[in-house]
Image (cartoon, grey):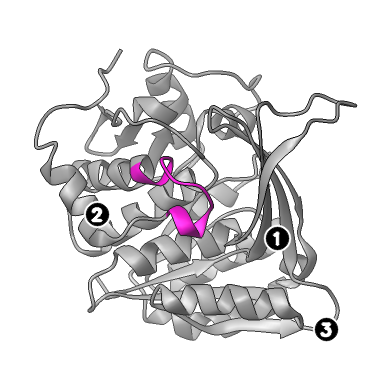
Amino acid sequence: MKPAIAVVGSLNMDFVVTTDHLPAPGETVLGRDFRMNPGGKGANQACAAGRLSPPQLRTYMIGRVGYDMFADHLKASLAAAGVDVSAVHATKSAPTGVALIWVDAEGQNSIVVAAGANLLLTKSEVEPMRPVFRQCGLALFQLETPVSTVQAALGAAREEGARTILDPAPARRLPEGMLEAVDLLTPNETEACILLGRPAGRVGLEEAPELAAELRSAGVGEVVLKLGDLGCYYSGPDGAYHVPGFAVEARDSTAAGDTFNGALAVALAEGKPMEEALRFANAAAAISVTRPGAQASVPTRQEVEEFLGARPGGEERPSG
């Protein structure tokens, strides 16, 4: 596999307030503290890939920012994680995207995103992405940029020989045929249900095989269903199985799914078997939820290896 990963997606500055509980509609709650953190689902996944990669594996970020102080901060954060940001371009037509995040005492969050410049990553910019895709064995996508752009970029990445991974978040229905350009789909429970037109709700291990099989029937090669503290469920041409999660004390789940995807891409780019790669991704995500922030919560490669080394075969959450 080509020794590089491309991430196409959003860059946002996150404004985070911690509270005892998330506000209900019309309710005002008092926050405990405030932080301003680099984020955006695309940038978070690129940060995770960059921070967890060995020296020979390169990560490229493709996206849009405004001409403002937030753009400089976001690009500097990614560069510090080892990410190539030469394909992150600025526009004067919109500000850098921002996300407003509330985190409760249990580590659960509620997020509102003002996409800003992310919405200006248009289909016309897909062709210039090809030289990056040509260097990469894997290309990661999410849905915080226009869906039409994501769909076109998925096809271009495939044509240039990259294996495509789509994290279908924020959750939404997708255009017919879009999933056929996805090699590996990584929804959480809510996203899987919405993709299939089902009522969103908690999904257990009993329902996971049916959901994954139905998603694969839409044209996806492989599915990894993210199940929170239960870990994940894989379904592909060579079989299906559950990879348990790790029991940790959650503090902030803001970028757990993004950390999972970045870590999974790194492990696959290194040639790890899928089950081993999923365990590596589960471990990285587990560490991230014990820390506040988005990119700030992403662990290093050494931290993940030490975490796994202390759990050679046990201490994982039971399968149910």
Q: What residue do we see at 43% from left, 41% from top? A: 289
Image vertical order of residue 3 relative to residue 251, above or below: below
Residue underneath mark 1: 148
Q: Which residues are magenta?
A: 287-297
Q: How far from the left and from the top, in percent, is residue 65?
A: 70, 75
- Quarter assignment of residue 109: top right
User: Mark 3 sits on what residue?
Assistant: 92
Mark 2 to mark 3 CA distance (whole Å): 40 Å
Query: Mark 1 against mark 3, which lies toward the viewer?
Result: 3
Figure check: 71 above or below 309: below
Question: Is residue 80 among what the camera can see?
Answer: yes
- Mark 3: secondary structure: loop
Question: Residue 16 vs residue 187: left or right?
Answer: right
Residue for badge 2: 303
User: In terms of secondary structure, where does tag 1 sit?
Assistant: helix
Q: Nearer the viewer, residue 115 or 224?
A: 115
Give the spatial CA distance, label 1 vs label 3. Answer: 22 Å
